[in-house]
Amino acid sequence: MLPVIFMSKHVFSVPDYYPAFSCKCAACRQTCCKGWNISITMQEYFHLLGMNCSPALRRRLDTAFHPADHPEPHRYAVITPNWRGECPLLDEDGLCILQKECGENAMSGVCRYYPRTPKSRFGYTCTLTGSCERVLELLYDKKEPVHMIPLELTWDIDLPAPDPNVQLTRAWQQLRLLAFDILQNRMLSLPARLETLSCHVDQLMAANSNAAAMQLLEAIDPADLCRQSGDFPTQSAAFCALLQIIDWLCDGSQSMEDIWLSCRAPLQLPASRLDFTPENTHTALRLYQQKAAEFARLYPQWEAYYENLLINHLLDDDYPFSERHEDVRLKQEAMNLTYALLRFFGVMYADGTRESLVDLHAACFHLIEHSNFDDLIPRMAARLNLNENTLLAMAQF
Ligand code: SF4
């Protein structure tokens, strides 16, 4: 067992489906170690190199990792995948041989805790990342709105102490609650819920003092539709912009590039992104709309699925603030684009089976929840000359 440096035990606020999670192990179609650069800490690396174990496990452990290109204590070595792109510690039965022989505590933190995502900056919260197929199944199965419940959890990782700024914490808690209620308001379509949230976020950010913003926040009724002001692009221009941003995002993405390439031919898209114009993508929009109608027929519960995906993502992403961002508008833009991507690829790629939708959404969340997605969005938007309302309009499809 690894020597434990940190031990953190607190009551966390978790979504009500959290306790139902258990790993599918060998039954998982796309195990989390497939095609992923899993890294381990320096302490874990040297522990695994010197650990007592059977000769067979020792042979595998000695070649399972290599030092990272720019090693740091928290990301010191990475798994060397086998020719199938899988972790070399996976046994024939799909189980981890390290865990089988030495127990769960011998595994690295990332393997032991995945897909759990504990947060502590504005209060102890935890959810499950949407890149895990079992988590997606739980989210699709959930019919009633999500509730948060208290649950005592213990981690042997370093969780930062909650932010001492009481005002910031209060704003975070209020805004998260509001987002939670708006995203679960089933009287509105999902695009209308995102528009309502975006509109409130803009009004809050325009307030001339923190006190005024808090007053505004407390007066908002999450049941009311709020329309975003300003100019919006035409439907063809917004769809063209969505295709451009998808092409930019998926270019070189391990999880999404092949999926995106397989969507291009059915949409009859020009070969180069430079030729994506509203005129040249007019046919693509018409073909997409036909697919969207088919998608609604194949997945009559799709809105409930997507609502739960967004709620879980809100928790995973630490909406409305995170370590790096306190500008809620940027977070909101990333949320709007998250929905736009999940929806576009769901329509274009899923074949009517639950498995295909799960695999697709897991791949999307590999890109969204395990990269610097939130940072990329403003950079891409600036490069492609897309304003806030264009990003919001992309969520209408
Ligand atoms: S993706 Fe989820 S269900 Fe599959 S092996 Fe990983 S943790 Fe288990």
Image (cartoon, grey):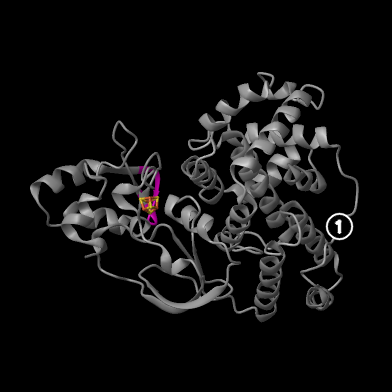
Q: Quadrant of residue 281?
A: top right
Which residue is at the front of the view, 364 or 207? 364
- Which SS class for mark 1? loop
Residue at image location 50% in from the left, 53% down from the top? 130
Residue 46 image offset from top left, x and y in percent: 24, 55
Query: In the image shown, does 297 or 174 lie closer to the viewer?
Result: 297
Q: Of residues 283 and 176, which is closer to you in this image?
A: 283
Could one spot residue 376 in this view of the protein? Answer: yes
Q: Quadrant of the N terminus?
A: bottom left
Q: Position of residue 77 (x, y in %)?
A: 33, 47
Q: Which stretch did the figure color magenta?
A: 68-76
**Displayed quadrant of residue 276:** top right
Residue 119 seen in render: no
Q: Which residue is at a point 32% across and 71% down the rendered structure image?
A: 5
Asked if residue 74 is among those painted magenta in the image, a careful observer would answer: yes
Q: Is residue 13 above or below residue 366?
A: below
Q: Which residue is mark 1?
A: 227
Name, please, the residue furthest toward the top.
271
